[in-house]
Image: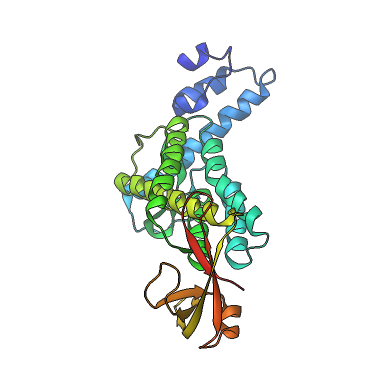
Amino acid sequence: MALENSMKNEPNYSRYSKEELEQALESIDKEKFPERVKSILKEIKLIDKREKVYEIYSSSKTKAIDFITLSRFPGLDKFSLAICLWFIFFPVPYGILLFVLLLLPFIGIILNGLDKPSISTLVNFRSGGKIDVADFIDLPALAIFIRILFDYTIDTYSAIFTTGSILLILIFGLLIFTHKFKITEPIPNKLLVYLMIIGNLTLYSYSSVVAINCTYDYSDYIEYSTTAIDKHIYRGKKHTSYFVTVKPWGHHREIEDIRITSSQYFKIQPGDLIQINYHEGLLGIKWFGVAN
């Protein structure tokens, strides 16, 4: 068989069927090639896991199942969750945590794609038929997006599209290079899998360029002075946002609300003179914020 003929050199076991792997396992010298035996058994186990997922989702999409991931590095998902929670709720040291989150999707895609598997291995299957993208992709995208909403106010959005598109093309190129983009496995909702992967990578790319642009922008900024007219709090279901209403400043010719921190909210009073720092941005995406 094909696998037996290729055993002189270490083969890519992911290219062979379960039957071929089992036949190779019967004929291989287990004492002479213990590492090959271990690799073959690992691949058979992964195939069994996939078959279990496909069987469950083909028979009943609503049947409750335990969490199943086809990722070959599930530990990376757990690490991603820990870093993302840290970054969202206590972002110190901010720059270092952001750097780690920026690398996680690239590292995860590379590690998961060492044997060039299908992109279906980047999808998790959860109870009740729910599907989501591997945590080392969707969690960094969500964490970075949440933080930039709270931490930065963007003034020019056109530059985000340009630089964000470049990053999106790079990570899609990496994905196509390391994975088989066509899903041949019998997975229901294949279109949804594609859309979710594309959507999460898009959110990651555009959020990341904003975070890089603002966090690592150490250039000089322009100081503008204006007067606080009012302040108010927006209380959502999961978060609270603080705003100050200010008079026109710089090229901003109308009264507007600017997001501030909770500590700034309790310091600033209507009528106070406040300073707004206007930044050019590392990547040319202009942004601003109220000085502490």
Q: In the rendered image, is residue 72 in sight?
A: no
Q: Residue at x 41, y 51 (%)?
A: 159
Residue 189 pos. (x, y %): 30, 48
Position of 172 compared to 143: left or right?
left
Residue 14 pos. (x, y %): 48, 28
Position of 176 compared to 148: left or right?
left
Front residue of this view, candidates 247 and 62: 247
- Seen in the picture, residue 246 relative to 209 is either above or below; the reply is below
Q: Residue at x 56, y 15 (%)?
A: 7
Residue 105 pos. (x, y %): 52, 45
Position of 46 compared to 75: left or right?
left
Residue 261 pos. (x, y %): 56, 75
Quadrant of the image occupied by residue 177: top left
* Snapshot colouring: rainbow
Front residue of this view, candidates 186 and 91: 91
Which residue is the extreme one toward the bottom? Answer: 270
Q: How many marks?
A: 0
- Seen in the picture, residue 249 relative to 78 is either above or below; the reply is below
Q: Residue at x 40, y 70 (%)?
A: 252
Front residue of this view, candidates 71 and 30: 71
The quarter of the image holding the C terminus is: bottom right
Q: In the rendered image, is residue 39 in sight?
A: yes
